Amino acid sequence: DVDLKHERSNANGASSELKALEDRLNKKIEESNKKIEESQQRHDRKIEEMQEENNRKIEELKNSHSNEASSLETKIAELQNTAKSVMTLRKEVDSDLKKKS
């Protein structure tokens, strides 16, 4: 009977040691999961910042190209007007030459 009580006492002691180990293990797991989640959030924020920066750069390039295209269109229009003026002058010169001859 004394041996049975002694065995129960040992079993209860072992059981509480296991419970303590389980509690410590669960606490470590929670801490680890929290660190993983924080790390993931940092990475997510970094990715979001990089995407915003890339989008901003894309917009700058689009605007730059749009401005360049607009500038080229303006220059083309100026050249077309110059060409029309040259043709008009040429017709006037031809007309003047015909009158003089």
Image (spheres, rainbow, N blue to C red):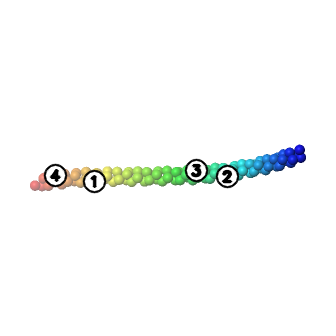
Circle nearer the viewer, 1 or 3:
3
Earlier-in-chain disc, 2 versus 4: 2
The amino acid type, in three-letter code, at marker 1 is Thr
- Whether the residues at callouts 3 and 2 have beta carbons within 8 Å, the answer is no
Mark 3 lies on a secondary structure that is helix
Earlier-in-chain disc, 4 versus 3: 3
- How far apart, in angstroms, are the residues tagged by discs 2 and 4? 93 Å
The amino acid type, in three-letter code, at marker 2 is Ser
Circle number at residue 44: 3
Circle number at residue 82: 1
- Left or right: residue 96 versus residue 20 is left
Residue 44 location (% of width, % of height) = 58, 50
- Whether the residues at callouts 2 and 4 have beta carbons within 8 Å, the answer is no
- Whether the residues at callouts 4 and 3 have beta carbons within 8 Å, the answer is no
Circle nearer the viewer, 3 or 2:
2
Circle number at residue 6: none
- How far apart, in angstroms, are the residues tagged by discs 4 and 3? 75 Å
> Are there few (<14), some (14-19), or many (20+) residues within 10 Å of tag 2?
few
Which residue is at the front of the view, 8 or 68?
A: 8
The amino acid type, in three-letter code, at marker 4 is Ser
> Are there few (<14), some (14-19), or many (20+) residues within 10 Å of tag 1?
few
Earlier-in-chain disc, 3 versus 2: 2
Query: Which residue bears the numbered disc 2?
Result: 32
Residue 79 location (% of width, % of height) = 29, 53
Residue 77 location (% of width, % of height) = 32, 51
> Are there few (<14), some (14-19), or many (20+) residues within 10 Å of tag 4?
few
The amino acid type, in three-letter code, at marker 3 is Asp
